[in-house]
Amino acid sequence: MVIVYGTRFYGKVNACGSSFLATQFFHIYYVPLIPIATQLILEENVGGSFKGVKSTFSVKSMLAAYLRVWGPIAVIVAIAIGIGALEDFGDDGLAMAVVGAFTAVVVLAMLASTILGFAVMGKLSLDEKRKRGAYAMHLGYHVDPADMGDARHSFRDGLLSTIIERSRGLAAMGYRMNADPSVAWPHVALDPTHSDDALVTAAFTLARIDASLAVGPHKMQMEQLHDQLWQRIARSNAPYLNVAA
């Protein structure tokens, strides 16, 4: 008897463009059993191979995998057990009614969970997709930079370099630079006297990365900055915001 086993990706969530989060599972006969790690898949290549980076473990992706595969199996098993129980209590009308009602409740609950796993869990809102359009200006993919694992550090350096370069360009055109942009970049990005979209979107992406790396008051500060920059970007309704949406 040949036993099919190995590892596969399941639990596709947060899909936008060619990118999504998925969790690698050890499987037997393609039924996910043990979650191993979550990856941010940047794109799927011909032949089924993936280009991705290791991400923090996603409970949402794991649950989606279990619900989408185990959910239908559980529904079938529950129905089979219920039918068997009804046959055992064929001579007792009250017992049959209780078993039938219990089976119906269990099957409906499992069916609702399965539908939830396919239709709702891990679906991005329109606003979240629009944010990914801004991130993609600097990351190259429609992904949440907070999901990029250790790659966040290298992208952070590149984003800060972009902000510094754009700030110096503004200064050369007469913009008053009162502080070092490598430190005061949040103030430069929020300044309403300029309209440098590349600088603002770079700062927006950087704020998201810093918020995902920070703890305590600094995390709250970066989340607030991220929200403020998003309000500025969203008002512009730039074409890149609607590409992923």
Image (cartoon, rainbow, N blue to C red):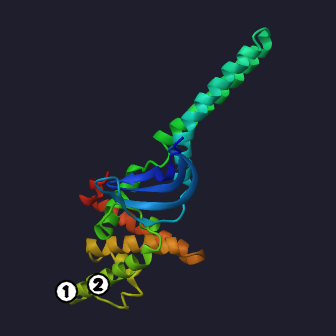
Q: Position of residue 36 (x, y in %)?
A: 55, 59
**173 is higher (above) or lower (below) than 213:** below
Report which quarter residue 188 is drawn in. Answer: bottom left
Q: Quadrant of residue 235?
A: bottom left
* 13 displayed left or right of 162: right
Q: In this view, does 78 lie above or below 235?
A: above
Percent x, y of residue 56: 52, 65
Inter-mark Cα distance, 1 to 2: 10 Å
Could you tell which of marks 1 and 2 lies nearer the N-terminus? 2
Residue type at mark 1: give it: Met
Numbered circle sitting on residue 167: 2
Residue 130 to residue 203: above or below: above
- Relative placement, left or right, of 26 versus 152 is right
Q: Which of 100 and 35 is in front in this view?
A: 35
Residue 59 % position (x, y): 57, 55
Rendered image: mark on residue 173: 1
Q: For label 1, count other residues whose C-alpha is less than 10 Å away and answer few (under 14), some (14-19) or many (20+).
A: few
Q: Position of residue 168 (x, y in %)?
A: 26, 88
Above or below residue 82? Residue 223 is below
Q: Which of marks 1 and 2 is in front?
A: 2
